[in-house]
Amino acid sequence: MLFQPAGLTCHDKERATPGFTLFAPIHTETAKIINMEGGTVQQWDLERGGVNLCRLLDNGNLIISELSEDGPIIPAGKGGLLREYDWDGNIVWEHHDPNQHHDFRRLPNGNTVYIAWNQLDDETAKKVKGGMPGTEYEYGDGGIFEDVLREVDPDGNIVWEWHTSDLDMNKYEICPLCRRHEWAHANTCSVLPNGDIMVSYRVLNLLIIVDRQTGKVKWEHHDNDLGHQHDCHMLDNGNVLVFCNGFHGGPKFFSTILEFDAETRETIWDYQAHPSLSFYSPHISGMQRLSSGNTLICEGGKGCLFEVTPEGETVWEFVNDIFGPNPLHGRMNWVFRATRYAPDDPRLKGRL
């Protein structure tokens, strides 16, 4: 392919779900909201690039992960600075944790929960199974880093933690094609209505729910068909929606969106493209079930945001036209995730 289109490439006004779409191109200093025609209606100029996962808070402010210079030099998902910007681009809150990476959520009580790295002691590290031998010492001071769920109050005080090493380390092995420096590459921490937290572990092909009160794992789904998944969350109907990247395992070497029953594990709905390889992002990415029943998909590795009907028909598509420098892959238009907000969303009231 010599040319990849950018900007708005499809808009079926009759079937697409009206709204405004928020995203932040990876490794750029930009977060933006676009309308259904692909025009920018709000933009924040950031101080630093990074993975740049972002959301709107209930007050309409932007919360986003930016890159800090300190902490482990692990390239996949590193953040380190959680910042809240008002609509005029002023920083009104920030939390610095050089170990923060990937996902975070603002809680109803005003606290913030996020994923962080923590280096395992030598004895615990010996329990980690699987992965590529000899890849334990590639980053930081060497050794293996676990994932931690960490909750902080508005002043940055840690009020709760949960360690991935609390899992049965004999039960789950790192994918044999993955490096051993992480146990186990968490990329999602989705807070459920009751306060429990759903976590996605990419290199284990594992989803779990951690009981917020007891710290016990109350639900798990381990399946290589997840293909090193991203962005698991529970829908209002109780089903689980997840982006199956189709990387390193399983019968599918292309991406799919999977909705399944959390109890029976039965597939309720899925999306894959035809031809199948035309939809493929081996990393990052996510999706959102919209009020219309359509699904907004972020095919992150191509910077492609598109909306499909329950029948799998594309009714809206936008390709990110902002490219940022990636230290490993050159200039990329990657997008970690995107979120659609309805025109009458209270977070946008009086602004758009």
Image (cartoon, rainbow, N blue to C red):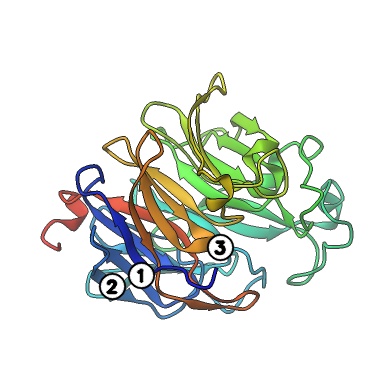
Q: Which residue is tagged 1? A: 31
In the displayed structure, does residue 182 sit left or right of residue 212?
right
Mark 3: amino acid: Gln
Residue 320 at what x, y percent from top left? 40, 67
Say whether disc 2 or disc 3 marks the residue closer to the N-terminus.
2
Residue ID for mark 2? 43
Contact check, label 1 and label 2, Cβ < 8 Å:
yes
Q: Is residue 118 left or right of residue 81?
A: right
**Nearest to viewer (mark 2 / mark 3):** 2
Q: Quadrant of the N terminus?
A: bottom right
The residue carrying mark 3 is 100
Label 2 to label 3: alpha-carbon separation = 24 Å
- In the rendered image, residue 270, in percent from the top left (x then y), is placed at 49, 34
Pointer 1 or 3: first along the chain: 1
Q: Position of residue 79 (x, y in %)?
A: 53, 67
- Which is nearer the eye, 103 or 249? 249
Type of the residue with mark 2: Gln
Front residue of 284 and 278: 278
